[in-house]
Amino acid sequence: MRILPLSLTKVLVEREGDRLVGPLEMTVGAGGISVVMGPNGSGKSTLLKVCHGLVTPTSGTVAWAGDQAANARRHQAIVFQKPAVLRRSVRENVAYPLKLRGVPRAERLEKADQLIARARLNALADRDATVLSGGEQQKLAIVRAWITEPEVLFLDEPTASLDPGATRDIEALIGSIDAAGTKIVMTSHDLGQIKRLATDVLFLLDGLIKERGTVEQIFDSPQSETLAAFLRGDIVG
Amino acid sequence: MNGLSDGFREAFRLVVTLDPALVEIAGLSLFVSLSAVAAASLIGLPLGALISVRSFPGRGVIVVLLNAFMGLPPVVVGLVVYLMLSRSGPFGVLGLLFTPTAMIIAQTILILPIIASLTRQSISDLWDHYRELLQSLDATPAQITATLLWDARRSLLTAVLAGFGRAIAEVGAVMIVGGNIEHATRVLTTAIALETSKGNLALALGLGLVLLILALVVNAATHALASRTMGRR
Ligand SMILES: Nc1ncnc2c1ncn2[C@@H]1O[C@H](COP(=O)(O)OP(=O)(O)OP(=O)(O)O)[C@@H](O)[C@H]1O
Ligand SMILES: [Mg+2]
């Protein structure tokens, strides 16, 4: 393990006096797909950004372990809830993180083409990425994040507002990334998807981890009435 | 009195006969303005990018000044450069007054705010869009600047062409620092002013039309070149 496990200790995020996330404790170990589940505004995106180091907590620590902990960001990648695509071709977009790392052009484009094929975007490889549909842009963003072979991949609502076909493609892609040994931490509020993908689940509400467990524990025996209500589709929070 | 058609006839004659005086004047116009565009782009593009991406004390002031200076009056720029370069001025020893170099300097100052301001505008918009992604990828400041300049290249081209348009069309600055000296510093706009004052209206109008054609050709050529080398967008 280069950078896992990740430990968040007494993490609290405040903005202009408002508490957004925490105080919370969290550990992310290797293997499997961890899903952060919770209603809108519960702090899922903020939590992922804290883990990735883009949001600095007001207090508490975010610690990576392993021999590469000092430059942990190099071994992670994130796909944002609304991923930005560069004003370049699909192929150039996917290859871009390797360009920043100084990988020679031929090598990085070859690797990009392989991933574009896995995402079933072959037909669009030379297209200007900004004209792609939402689902296609989401796939692009996922393989662009994967191209550096991160040890941990954060995915923020990778299928929100996509149709069933695109959702299935992206879930398959997430499956192959998981199978390739990359730890996935994702957010979702699609209960069906969580059941299909998750190995373990964190239930986040109002910036706090209300409950955590394996996917079976969470769905089959919720400990709190709030979680049970959330799983029934009731409004919580 | 049929000034316009006389002007067209004169322009036509000047162009088809490749009138040597015209070629010299138009050539100098192009040389001075393209040099100024090159110099102002070299400074203005990175400067515009820098003030979009970096925050530092005084940035707001620079933005306001650049925006305000987009409309600098050419004669004022010419006058200031004149004072700088004149014998008694701080750069008098260089002996640059009434040379094409002085004209390039004046036009560079004139269009630098245009290029830098327009660059800042398009780079800022793009940076808002790219910021999180580039931060998450740990892009260095140099990589960020290069990425933004490249991906904004279409609008930057427009910024550069706007600068060129202003440079090639202005008369006040080049008149003052160049002096409209025949075979030395005479350009299309100063020649037009001179011919007009002498009452050669057809010739003046002809030169004006040549100026217009020149600006059109440069714009068209740039766009053609751009779409060949920059991809479809
Ligand atoms: N930079 C910020 N400044 C102030 N408030 C913020 C900031 N970022 C997020 N918030 C607030 O923090 C709360 C949590 O936001 P966050 O985006 O993490 O929620 P989320 O669970 O991802 O929601 P969604 O399901 O809608 O994506 C929200 O109330 C949001 O308005
Ligand atoms: Mg979110």
Image (cartoon, coloured by chain):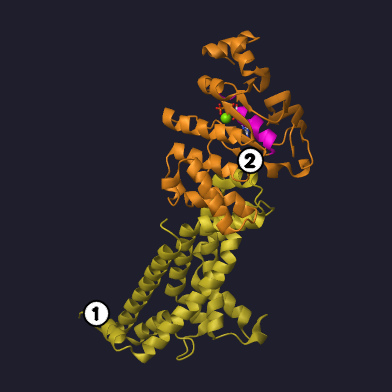
Q: Looking at the figure, which quarter contains the C terminus of chain A?
A: top right
Where does label 1 land, which residue?
B3
Q: Nearer the viewer, residue B209 or A54?
A: A54
Q: How crowded is mark 2: few (under 14 residues within 10 Å), some or many (20 or more)?
A: many
The structure residue drawn at horizontal position 45% and vertical position 76%, both measured from the top left corner, is: B171
Where does label 2 land, which residue?
A77
For the question of whether residue B69 can be seen, the reply is no
The answer to whether residue A199 is left or right of residue B17 is right
Residue A161: image location, x then y, percent: 46, 30
Dot 2 lies on which element?
strand
Q: Which chain is orange?
A: A
Q: Is residue A41 magenta?
A: yes
The structure residue drawn at horizontal position 32% and vertical position 77%, both measured from the top left corner, is: B209
Q: Do tags 2 and 1 sit on the same chain?
A: no
Residue A132: image location, x then y, percent: 43, 43
The chain that hosts pointer 2 is: A
Q: Nearer the viewer, residue B207 or B160?
A: B160
The answer to whether residue B17 is left or right of residue B230 is left
- Magenta residues, start to end: A40-53
In the image, what residue type sits under mark 1? Gly
The structure residue drawn at horizontal position 55% and vertical position 33%, both measured from the top left corner, is: A174
The answer to whether residue B52 is left or right of residue A67 is left
Residue A89: image location, x then y, percent: 47, 52
Q: Nearer the viewer, residue B204 or A105?
A: A105
Q: In this view, does A201 lie above or below B164?
A: above
Q: In this view, does B26 lie above or below B153?
A: below
Q: How crowded is mark 1: few (under 14 residues within 10 Å), some or many (20 or more)?
A: few
Residue B67, image quadrant: bottom right
Q: Colour of chain B?
A: yellow
In the image, what residue type sits under mark 2? Ala
